[in-house]
Image (cartoon, rainbow, N blue to C red):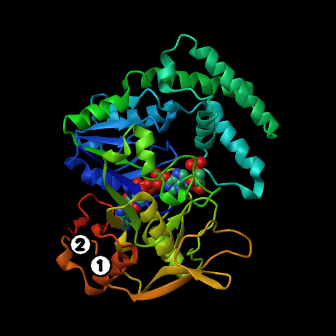
Amino acid sequence: MKVDILLGLQWGDEGKGKVVDVLTPRYDIVARFQGGPNAGHTLEFDGHKVVLRSIPSGVFQGNINIIGNGVVLDPVLFAGEAKDLEATGLDLHRVLKVSRKAHLILPTHRLLDAANEAAKGKGKIGTTGKGIGPTYTDKISRNGLRVGDLEAADFDERLAAATARHIDTIKALGGSVDTDQLNSLIATWKDAVAYLLTYDIIDTEHYINHALVEGKKVLCEGAQGTMLDVDFGSYPFVTSSNTVAAGACTGLGIAPGRVGDVYGIFKAYCTRVGSGPFPTELFDEDGKRMRDIGHEYGAVTGRERRCGWIDLVALRYAVMINGVTRLIMMKSDVLDTFATIKACTAYRIGESVTRDFPFSLDTPGNEPTPIYEELPGWNCDLTQATSPEQFPEAFKKYIAFIEKELGVPVTIVSVGPDRTQTIELS
Ligand code: GDP
Ligand code: IMO
Ligand code: MG
């Protein structure tokens, strides 16, 4: 069997959690392949709203869910999230498996994240403060501690060595560490580790590949979005992992030839949280309306999301890098009351016009100016639609326009946050 991958094409928060939950009944296994508790994946069903950070979005439908080796895991946040789910009656121990190779976020990683940001001053990334960058830094510099290491006899010594090294770095960055506070954080962290170890900690790469040989169907769930990818995003204002389709191969141990469909999710407009360039950002009434109607506030940090028109230059690039085979358009209903809708089809950079995503979006003097095409709005309530036949003509034209620009069919359209507000086109 092949695996399918579902990932964000913009700057995150496209609605991945909702769609993974919707697609889950078609799969046997759902697997997160990168990121950590910087993610906030929202699911709404049966009148409930749940935000998942480290736990895959397929846990509510009885399937096996996997936290893959590419994920960075904070035992404290994991325990909080998992216990909340258990309190609802969900038998998480039955459905969840965790990779031995996933890297651990230590208390000092979070402190380092804050120290790095403070040291960057005005140039700060605006991270989620969850220790993501420092944990991946330790992974790549071969200093990380993994979930499987928790079973090692010398784990405490290794934790102490990592903590001491982090404290030195924090001090070098001009920060300080309160010893009592840190000891208390470490004690809480160790309690959470004991809880984490009650889960099935396995070699998930073997598990997934055996399942594929047996004909099981696997959906890989991405976190963040392509514009936040450490290689292809708006570097350095990105996260520290590969959010693109290739990340599913390294983050789960899946061979490239095993990749089947790649579902690319985007909003009918565009948002971004944190710092960094955003060519189609709106600072006017339209942007404010998108934020208000779309409730564009971070699921994890509560921060205001910056809003703007859809950017087809960036999306075209994301489709190319990920090999997207099916597009999923989210939050279409948010544009219901806009008389005119704009779509950026090209950038003007200096004297030239390009449809290709450039090396940098924020080279001083060479910042792209979006070139827009205007389309008529549909001016009706999409949230009640249950089939594509009910779509107004103007909305059908918007979808067709995007398909033509991106060269890939839109196969699912979302018209509201609830599981049921999801319409398949083909
Ligand atoms: P994720 O990180 O990609 O899973 O997305 P988030 O959960 O961070 O943000 C998406 C937000 O939009 C959540 O609050 C969802 O409940 C909401 N949402 C998802 N799809 C739709 C939709 O089609 N319409 C509206 N109005 N809200 C949606
Ligand atoms: P989901 O999975 C939106 C952003 C942060 C910051 C940058 C780096 O919910 O779509 P980090 O903490 O990763 O070092 O922050 O990336 N960011 C996200 N923005 N959605 C996310 O996840 C994000 N995860 C990180 O705001 O700009
Ligand atoms: Mg989110």
Give the amino acid type for the residue marked by disc 2 in the picture: Gln
> Hey, which residue is sitting farthest top in the picture?
153
Residues tagged 2 and 1 counted as in contact (Cβ below 8 A): yes
Residue 56: assigned label: none
Q: Where is residue 410 in the image (x, y as percent from the top left)?
A: 30, 69
The type of residue carrying mark 1 is Asp
Relative depth, front residue between 286 and 393: 393
Q: Position of residue 159 (x, y in %)?
A: 62, 21
Residue appearing at x 59%, y 73% in the figure: 279
At horizontal 70% and vertical 54% (from top left) the residue drawn is: 124
Badge 2 density bin: few <14, some 14–19, many ≥20, Cα 10 Å? few
The foreground one among 319 and 418 is 319
Picture quarter with the C terminus = bottom left
Compute the Cα span from label 2 to label 1: 7 Å
Q: Is residue 357 visible?
A: yes
* Residue 369, image quadrant: bottom right
Q: Which residue lies furthest to the front in this view?
A: 257
Q: Is mark 2 on a helix, strand or loop?
A: loop
Residue at numbered disc 2: 384
Q: In which quarter of the image is residue 189?
A: top right
Residue 261, image x, y percentages: 30, 55
Label 1 residue near ligand 1, CB within 8 Å: no
Residue beneath disc 1? 381
Q: Is residue 92 visible?
A: no
